[in-house]
Image (spheres, rainbow, N blue to C red):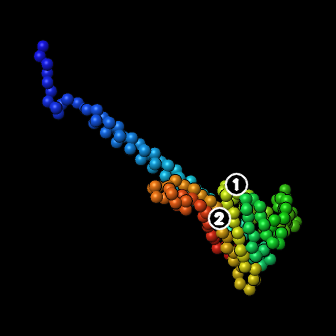
Amino acid sequence: MKRLVLPPSERGFTLIEVLVAILLVAIGIFGFAKMQALALSSTQVSSARSIVSMQASSLAAAMQGNRTYWASGVAPASFSTAQSTVTDATGVLSATVGSCEAAAKPATPACTSAQLAARDVQQWASNLANLLPTSSSTVSCSTSTSVPVSCVLTISWKERYVASTRATASDSAATGGSRSFTLYIEP
């Protein structure tokens, strides 16, 4: 029998070609995994920032809904929250308040405007703490009634995310840290 000899271009893959192909596929898979990690990290950061924005709007809406208290100039000049604890110098917003809801329409309100404000702020602080455990907030309000009352709400929280390059991975400020959101409110 005669042996058939094929030209070099038709003899198949060599071991080096196979190893190069495996290396290229591995690099592609690692790149894809890094892209997925960055996408997941960006989604988590975006989610936290959206929560902060919605929570800030929620407190603004509660303040505007109770203008009797907030726009009258009797509200505390400032208060803060850490987790679900509300702290203010007057003790009005940190006071324990029962339910302001009545089974039927009462002849008089079930709560005063100050009690309703305390309940709103305490529920808001509790919701913020449940959604973002590392958050805290401060609210500073003007108390002069000669001009419209205005408040500045600042929410602070910590976030961490995946670095996109080796240079940013070594920089702790680029991979997370304290962030803040400020909202101007006129109740």
Quick one: 46 or 165, which is closer to the camera?
165
Res. 167 visible in picture: yes
Image-based side of 175 in relation to 82, left or right = left
Q: Give the percent coordinates (x, y) of residue 94.
A: 81, 65
What is the crowding at mark 2: few (fewer than 14 residues within 10 Å), some, or many (at least 20)?
A: some
Looking at the image, residue 7 lies above or below residue 85? above
Which residue is at the far left? 2
Q: Nearer the viewer, mark 1 or mark 2?
A: 2
Mark pair 1, 2: CA separation? 14 Å
Which residue is at the far right? 107
Q: Which residue is mark 1?
A: 130
Image-based side of 174 in relation to 20, left or right = right
Q: Give the percent coordinates (x, y) of residue 69.
A: 78, 73
Looking at the image, residue 125 lies above or below residue 150? above
Which of the 4 image quadrants contains residue 53?
Answer: bottom right
The quadrant of the picture occupied by the C terminus is: bottom right
Q: Mark 1 or 2 closer to N-term?
A: 1
Q: Which residue is mark 2?
A: 156
Q: Give the percent coordinates (x, y) of residue 179.
A: 60, 64
Q: At 68% across and 55% down in the image, what residue appears? A: 133
Q: Amino acid at mark 2?
A: Ser
Q: Amino acid at mark 1?
A: Asn
Res. 120 visible in picture: no
